[in-house]
């Protein structure tokens, strides 16, 4: 039988009927295809590992490295500069928590400005609110936006919406250039610019993340 070791009963170097046993025949199972894993170091003593089905895309833009991986348990995951940004199975936890509480608290939200958020998930959740008439999303990296618009099927409808106004620029500069009267007409300003893990590492080193 493949993968089994032939059983031989031994007695002081001889088998049960008195013949010297000189060898045990072993048959190795065929080598399985090498497994692929995505590994991310969170801290010096903490790493996260995800088993992969495949690597769907890997490339680089002017600003950052981009990858899309298909994980065994979390579906497609967006990786930027070696850090997982979101995974399709559970990204809703972050984006729903970010978007819906302030929009539900606002009595009549109409215009929302998203700083960052190039993957489109925040815009998708904002557009679920019927009172919203305009969503302005500003992201610095056009290649990331185009990449997400192509590969992240959950956000196709958001990118195709007539209510979405997409600006490719540094969101911080755009925010500063908006006139005061225009700012006063915004219902909500969402910030998706901060790398939480990087911020934690800066604070641990005794420095400000700003």
Image: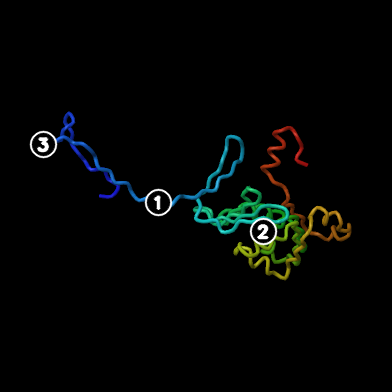
- Residue 58 point in image, percent of width and height: 61, 56
Indicate how the structure is coloured in the image: rainbow
Task: Please name whichever residue, 21 or 177, is drawn nearer the observer in this view of the structure.
Answer: 21
Name the quarter where the C terminus is drawn.
top right
- Whichever of callouts 2 and 1 sits on the residue coming sooner in the sequence is 1
Tell me, for residue 199, which label it has, or none.
none
For mark 2, give the secondary structure. loop
Whole-number angstrom distance, CA of label 2 to CA of label 1? 36 Å
Tell me, for residue 17, which label it has, or none.
3
Q: Residue at x 76, y 37 (%)?
A: 208
> Crowding near pointer 2: few (<14 within 10 Å), some, many (20+)?
many
For mark 1, give the secondary structure. loop
What residue is disc 2 on? 119
The quarter of the picture where residue 23 lies is top left
Q: Residue at x 57, y 38 (%)?
A: 46
- Which residue is situated farthest in the right direction here? 180
Task: Please name whichever residue, 45 or 155, is drawn nearer the observer in this view of the structure.
Answer: 45
- Whichever of callouts 3 and 1 sits on the residue coming sooner in the sequence is 3
Q: Residue at x 27, y 45 (%)?
A: 4
In the visual, does 51 lie left or right of 122? left
Task: Please name whichever residue, 62 or 120, is drawn nearer the observer in this view of the structure.
Answer: 62
Q: Nearer the viewer, mark 2 or mark 1?
A: 1
- Which residue is situated farthest in the top direction here? 12
In the rendered view, tell whether residue 189 sits above or below residue 21.
below
Tell me, for residue 32, which label it has, or none.
1
- Residue 154 point in image, percent of width and height: 60, 63
- Residue 155 point in image, percent of width and height: 63, 63
In the visual, does 129 lie left or right of 50? right
- Which residue is situated farthest in the bottom direction here? 162
- Residue 203 point in image, percent of width and height: 72, 36
Whole-number angstrom distance, CA of label 3 to CA of label 2? 73 Å
């Amino acid at each position: 039988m493949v993968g089994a070791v032939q059983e031989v009963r031994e007695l002081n170097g001889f088998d049960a009927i008195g013949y010297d046993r000189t060898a045990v025949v072993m048959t190795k199972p065929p080598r399985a295809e090498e497994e692929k894993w995505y590994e991310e170091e969170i801290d010096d003593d903490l790493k996260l590992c995800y088993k992969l089905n495949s690597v769907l895309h890997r490339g680089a833009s002017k600003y950052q490295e981009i990858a899309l991986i298909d994980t065994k348990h979390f579906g497609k995951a967006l990786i930027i500069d070696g850090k997982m940004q979101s995974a399709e199975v559970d990204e809703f936890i972050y984006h729903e928590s970010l978007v819906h509480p302030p929009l539900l608290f606002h009595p009549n939200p109409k215009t929302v400005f998203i700083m960052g958020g190039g993957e489109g998930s925040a815009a998708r959740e904002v557009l679920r609110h019927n009172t919203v008439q305009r969503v302005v999303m500003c992201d610095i990296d056009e290649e990331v936006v185009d990449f997400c618009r192509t590969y992240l099927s959950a956000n196709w409808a958001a990118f195709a919406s007539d209510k979405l106004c997409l600006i490719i620029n540094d969101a911080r500069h755009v925010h500063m250039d908006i006139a005061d009267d225009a700012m006063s007409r915004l219902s909500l300003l969402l910030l998706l610019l901060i790398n939480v893990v990087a911020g934690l590492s800066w604070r641990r080193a005794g420095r400000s993340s700003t």
